Image (spheres, rainbow, N blue to C red):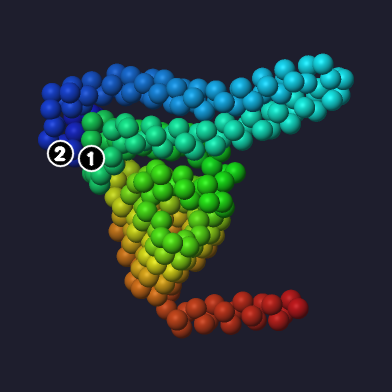
Amino acid sequence: MKAFAEDDTRNPPPANFLDRLVRRYARPAYVLTVLGLYLLVSTALGLALTPAIWCWQLAASWSQSLPFLTHGLVLGLGSAVAFFVFGFGLLVVVPIYNLVLPTRVKPFTGGYYTLRAAPWLLHNALFYLVRYTFLPFVTLTPFGIWFLRAMGMTIGRHAFINTEYISDPQLIHIGKDAALGGSVRIFAHYGGGGYLVVAPVVIGDRATIGLGATVMGDVEVGRGATVLPHSVLLPGSRVGEGETWGGVPARRITREEMEIFKRGIQGVQQRTG
């Protein structure tokens, strides 16, 4: 219990008796919360699976009297259709859960074991239910953009999002004509030393986040800025308008440095050409 007492000093004062109880009995409260989340997401999965099962049963019933090979083919096609029915069902069910449940995430700094962290936990638990199942199938489609917006993510017109590696969508703002490359990791939180920080991420209009880059919580990328592939923007980074940043951790790269990089790349190409 001593470790939790030290961690609790990072928290704001308890909001009420329940908050004090959660902090006092942190581990039991955490276990109960996780079990409750499993139960909750099971109901969401069940609702999304229901029409999918109906589709499969319809295919099985209709093909019952067909020859063996044809019956198997129909069942295979029916199973594939049922999978997509399930996936699109999740795209509808999860945002409804997110809307009606207490998932309003606000910027927060403190310990993990507090009621103020509960909306963040619940919001991400629901979002991950889709992220780790069906979101990769719709990432580059209007359905993916619709789902992200339905989960609270602000996305400007004509923004291009080629990644499903997202957390905390409620606290992420993507500007107009911005581009997130493949496998970009963007999340509005970070943790360490026994405490959690939840802070917004803002990607400005026409900004470009390169392939595989990581954008952490409390980061702002200005209008027309570029983050080079596989770079890491640490918390507190402020990328100015039109600037280019790169590296691990990412830092500003001047125009002169970029010209040197380009000449080096061209020189390698000439030597190997």
Residue 187 appears in the picture as rendered = no
- The residues bearing labels 1 and 2 have C-alpha atoms spaced at a distance of 7 Å
Number of callouts: 2
Q: Which amino acid, mark 1? A: Gly
Image quadrant occupied by the N terminus? top left
Q: Earlier in the sequence, mark 1 or mark 2?
A: 2
Q: Are marks 1 and 2 in contact (CB under 8 Å)?
A: yes
Residue 30 appears in the picture as rendered = yes
SS for callout 2: loop
243 lies left or right of 138: left
Q: Nearer the viewer, residue 41 or 2?
A: 41
10 Å crowding of disc 2: few (<14), some (14-19), many (20+): few
Q: Which mark is residue 130?
A: none
From the viewer's perspective, is residue 273 above or below residue 39? below
Q: Which amino acid, mark 2? A: Pro
From the viewer's perspective, is residue 222 above or below residue 89? below
**Residue 227: where, in percent of width, then height?**
45, 66
61 lies left or right of 53: right
**Residue 214: where, in percent of width, then height?**
45, 55
Q: Residue at x 46, y 66 (%)?
A: 177
Q: Which mark is residue 110?
A: 1
Quarter of image, res 120: top left
Q: Which mark is residue 12?
A: 2
